[in-house]
Amino acid sequence: MDGRDLVRAVKDIGTERGRRAWLSAWRRRRADAEGLPRRGAERARVPGLLVGTEPRPGGGVLRFARSELVVRVMAGGVVFWAWDGAGATPSYAVVGSGPEPDLRAVLEPDTGGGWRVVSERVTVAVSRHGALEVRTPGGTVLRRESPPRWWEPAPPAGEAAEAGEASEAGEASEAGEASEAGEASEAGEASEAAEAGEASEAAEGAGAAGPRPAGEAAYSGGAGGSGTGIPGEGRAGGGGGVARWGVRSEVPADARFFGLGGRAAGPRLRDGTYRLWNTDPKGGFGPGVDPLYLTMPVQMVVADAGTHLVFHDNGWDGRVLLREGEEGVGSGQDRPGSSELRMEGGPLRCWVLVGTPARVLQGWSGLTGGAAVPPEWALGYQHARWGFGSASEVRRVVAGYAARGLALSAVHLDIDHYDGHRVFTVDEDRFPDLPGLARELREQGVRLVSIVDPAVKAGDALHAAGLTVGSGGAFVRDARGREVRGEVWPGECAYPDFTDPAVREWWGGLYEERLAQGFSGFWHDMNEPVSFAAFGDTTLPRSARHAMDGAGGDHREGHNVYALGMARAGWEGLVRLRPQERPFLFSRSGWAGMQRYGGTWSGDVETSWEGLRASLALVLGLGLCGVPYSGPDVGGFGGSPSPELYVRWLQLGAYLPLFRTHAAIWAGRREPWEFGPEVEEQARAVMAERERLRPYFVTLAHMARRTGAPYVRPVWWGAPEDRRLRDCEDSFLLGDALLVAPVLECGADRRAVRLPRGRWYDTATGAAYEGPGQILLDAPQGRIPVLARAGALLPVRSPAGDGVELEVWAPARGRTGGGVVVRDPGPGFGAGTVERYTSRWAGDAVLVEDEAGLPVEGVVVRGL
């Protein structure tokens, strides 16, 4: 608890909700004291020396003195490895059983007594001490992972096993240090020896050391000595508790880190510690706040040598310590970058994908599932507010947009439309005919979207219905079988266990009530999950029990996947209820694989210029983790933006997948006309351009599902070897065609824009610029720099608004261009037909041809 939280907690004592929050915090602490084993003495373990191998399809098993490693290369060059019996499945992230092994990849001896698995796209080498290297086919090392270290609960004092294991640890220390010290010539062995020595030395004193402070260098393992890698297992015997573990990886000195879910400090992740625990930050956040609502152990690492994505498939609480490398000056030695992962339990299993950024995310999409395609209307501008208050207020706002000719696709209703904030209810006094309101708005082309919170008011009808689900009811229980209660907006609440298939089916069926009320889409909130607390974690007790899809477990492993399970329940329920329509669903929290069910949004980003910058960082970072549909609360959540900040946020949001204003009940209004006539005109231009580009967003949505490529991409997407582009964080590519340079600083009316290679046109002036390089462009408050790639073709809405036309930007002389178009297939699950076009010069005109080589008429040519 920091000073701000302490002051808030003390003030809250004077309110009813505040007193309940204090009681909730004490209940959570008491539940964990009763239900979690105390962490006592721990014993360190490292793999030890290699003692045998067993070839298997795509790789094999390597047996060490105290551990076992499985390494496989899958079809497409996807790499999987796991320690101590952990398997690729079951997994909440991976679809099905995962990819098939590459039968051409075989386990063969390597230098220095190690082994390697060689495939067409990647080589994985394992040293005789358990270090792994991921190499390109040419032998360049992309990632070097040191032998893992586990910290397991020590057996009770006096047992014979303890003496034997202590002796073994001491022997390992001597053998490891002696053998490793003489192998510095083997790549990575010097640092590996040092780490193995540290772990062994720590093991000698572990029996009396007791628990170690958070952040100390020695820590423990996930699957432990008896772990299986199955969710809900990964425990070590002897003394109770769970084995913790950690691994340290090195990457090239020039590498840059991206990902780890939604990070306000990104998109490039600099030196620091990043926690893996989905968290409501309790108020508005900016770049300095971490963690946030959606974390995941997914890193994309970009270096001159190549790009790779690494995913440690483990939903437990953990921390990632990142340190960028430094290249030596002159003949000086490079210091590699490092990534140190420390997990509080769970299996130690890892997936690695290598290649270009596009190939890596295509492989990730194949591994974890294609992104859900939102309905066409969800790619337009949307308006939300906590505090609409009544149906008449909704009508007033919608009429304001219509009267001013401002495009509006949807209105979102927050918790104030519920009866007493209770989910799946309606306040009949303020919304007496919600279905009628929905029909009325839909006739105007505006959909209604409903918030859905997971917490169920204890004692109401929905709670009673949940108690009849399955053999033990639908709700999370503690270690003694008592229902876990928390405090949320309705008061004392129970929490559905979305890791139980029966509960997911029941919950999904509840959306029938929402559909009957006329809602067309849904946004999941408060699903980290949140329980108000005056101090400590604002979530359920860590001792709370979850089904974990039959494996059983507690909230330590169920917390991070809770929102993912809720999204799955909602998605599958909506598909059952309306199989002819693609659901529209997005969530504040989630985990790896979230894209299968929908998207996400920023949560309560603060109303500030720093919050504006964090909004872009979140969207870019999530896209690189495979979640392409996301966006911020335009204008920030909790404050009143200045006219300039509002316009700049609106301009950014217009080029992001989810384009939505939202604000708290106490915050300033977000309707454009509330900021004066000048801002209203500027907003009209922004919204009109979004409408014009909506067919392009449709194409990007379908291509994201097909290829895994996010709508919004870092400017280095097509040229990851360009170091200057890798360090560019204030602009982005929208698909392949457009480069967007938002204004993120107060008072700026010009800004520098770094261009990738090729010719780029300023879409406002038509001026052409050659990249790579940096240019300075005007950015008056009415617009931001947007550039089109020469030769790019994109679908846009026709000026009459009744169809789609093709727009092409002239390629450079002597070069060709082109693009793909996917037209909206309607509200169902149709994939849509991919149309491919090429553009080239034919004399003094630009010619566009389809796949058959036939000229296409009616194309708008720009950049001449």
Image (tube, helix red, strand yellow):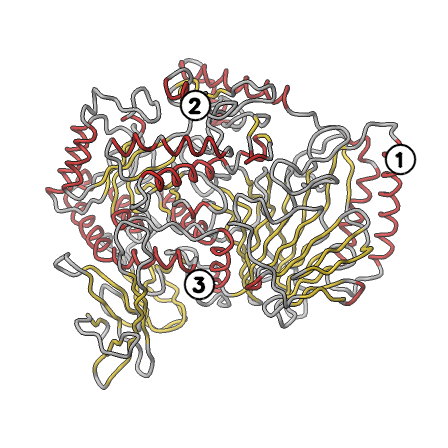
Name the residue tied to disc 1.
163
Which quadrant is the N terminus positioned in? top right
Which image quadrant for residue 692? bottom left
Q: Secondary structure at mark 1?
A: helix
Q: Secondary structure at mark 3?
A: loop
Q: Earlier in the sequence, mark 3 or mark 1?
A: 1
Q: Residue at x 57, y 40 (%)?
A: 315
Position of residue 83 in the picture relative to residue 615 (left or right): right
Q: Nearer the viewer, residue 263 or 470?
A: 470
- Check the image and report above or below for 816 versus 597: below
Counting from the top left corner in percent of width and height, residue 382 is at 26, 43
Question: Residue 543: where, in percent of width, then height?
Answer: 59, 26
Say which residue label 2 marks: 466
Q: Quadrant of residue 402?
A: top left
Q: Earlier in the sequence, mark 2 or mark 1?
A: 1
User: Is residue 252 at all visible to an observer of this figure?
Assistant: no
- Compute the Cα span from label 2 to label 3: 47 Å
Residue at 16 percent of width and 31 percent of height: 436
Q: CA distance from mark 3 to mark 1?
A: 55 Å
For the C terminus, the image quarter is bottom left
Question: What is the three-letter code of the residue carrying label 1?
Answer: Ala
Secondary element type, mark 2: helix
Residue 496 percent across, percent down from the top left:
46, 27
Q: Amino acid at mark 2?
A: Gly
Q: Is residue 622 left or right of residue 437?
A: right
- In space, the residues marked 2 and 1 are separated at their CA atoms by 51 Å
Q: Which residue is depicted at the point 43% across and 48% down?
A: 595
The residue labelled by disc 3 is 717
Can the viewer see residue 54 in this picture? Answer: yes
Q: Check disc 3 and give the amino acid type.
A: Trp
